[in-house]
Amino acid sequence: MIEGTLPRERENQLLDYLSVFFLCVFLVFSSLNFPFTSLLFLIAAVVLRLFAILHEVLDWRILAPGGAMLLWVTVGLLYTPDFSEGVRFLLRLLLCLLMGYMATRSRAYMRLLIQALFASSLLVLASVYWQLLLPDATVALYEHIMRPNAYDAVMNAHKYFEKRPAGICGYTSTTGYLLAVLSGMAFVRTLSRLRERHFSRALLYGAVFVLSLTGIMLVSKRSLFLATIAICVLFLLFYYTRRAGQRVAMIVALVTGIAALLLVMHHSNTLSAFFDRLTNIENDYYSSGRLDIYPRTWALFLQNPLLGRGSGSFIKLYGDLYGHLGGGAHNIYLQLLCENGVPGLLLIGGFLATNLVSAIRALRRDRKNDLLCFSVYGQLVFLFYGFFGNPLYDEILLCVYCLLAFIPYLREEPDHA
């Protein structure tokens, strides 16, 4: 593991001093009967002490940006109008970061997680096709396992989700993101097997890639579909081979396949809904309300651009002004500006950028490492989807991101797990 810039004892000592300081402030504010403020300093003291304990596993490349991000979100709880939602956001960040950090302790554990993620995404993919082919059986299964009318409550809770299969997740964003991750993993493994001349396995993973890409179309997630295609082309250009002829041939094959899929979509009753959503973005129905949400979110941000309106405040603020909003701003960067201001966007964006740069640098040194390819691909999908969805505010998507993003920080000592 790479050492920090300071001796480890001094780093831990600094964290302990800060933790004790915040604990003293907690005691003072608590005795003065400021319950919420004192709770924030207690959370900060616990987090800093936890970082000191975890420092045997981590290095400052992830500890510093992650800690700064959590600290700013904690400060945002001081003035948020929705304290409970802000605490949920903070805990969501903390738990997902800890899960990713812990996974760096063991390469064997990380490999097991990647295999489990691949298998889970395959199950989600199978459930999408099951729902598409046997909708009545899907309804019966949900009602048998959960309760009557569970299918309508989970699958069709919003008008935009009508006639769009979401599988066992019940939510198209979660399903679409998992299928996008599965597409990338299958694509990378296809390239690896082609490089190793294992053509039968390459054909198998290629089939998974086509099925998962078609699954994204069935779920009708336009941004994830476009992100998957663009990132696959980038991988072909930069990481598969140094031979220009092979790169051009594979890109032509990929583009030809995509064109064939689009042609099938245009003439298929099942996929025509996705084709309509892909070509009618100016329509409010097909934009899922984003044409109104984006300018309103920007206006909320301009009311306090420095500090923002407080962690977790967006849904309440938007609801008070414009009516109830089921999800977030459909753009994590705009929502971060609104809630945590310009410093919050810079700190959280810096954390995301640090992870991506670390993964790209590691991949440049080892182009044949599938785990590093998964890391770069998963991060790029997350960042791209952040322009049109709410992945930072969804614990499933955020947890998957952390697991993939922290792969470059795996310990370098021999693993006996």
Image (tube, rainbow, N blue to C red):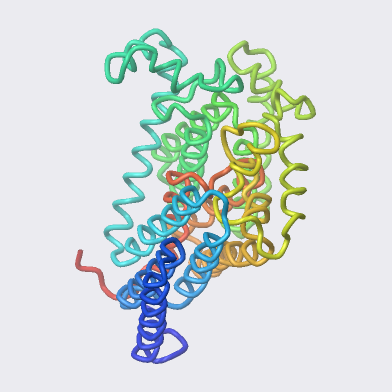
Q: Which residue is drawn at 55% across and 15% down?
A: 163
Q: Nearer the viewer, residue 98 or 413?
A: 98
Q: Nearer the viewer, residue 220 or 301?
A: 301
Vertical order, 333 against 341 (above or below): above
Q: Which of 355 and 182 is in front in this view?
A: 355
The quadrant the N terminus occupies is bottom left
Is 268 displayed left or right of 411 in the figure? right
Q: Which residue is drawn at 58% across and 49% down?
A: 313
Residue 398 on image: x %, y %: 47, 50
Q: Nearer the viewer, residue 145 or 415?
A: 145
Task: Examine the image and state in which quarter residue 17 appears.
Answer: bottom left
Is residue 220 at all visible to an observer of this figure? yes
Q: Which residue lies furthest to the left in this view?
A: 416
Vertical order, 217 against 32 (above or below): above
Residue 6 on image: x %, y %: 44, 90
Q: Which residue lies furthest to the top in this view?
A: 136
Q: Which residue is drawn at 45% across and 35% down?
A: 203
Residue 309 on image: x %, y %: 64, 55
Is 303 displayed left or right of 226 in the figure? right
Q: Residue at x 55, y 30 (%)?
A: 216
Task: Examine the image and state in which quarter residue 342 appears.
Answer: bottom right
Vertical order, 307 against 214 (above or below): below
The quadrant the C terminus occupies is bottom left
Is residue 240 at all visible to an observer of this figure? no
Residue 159 on image: x %, y %: 60, 19
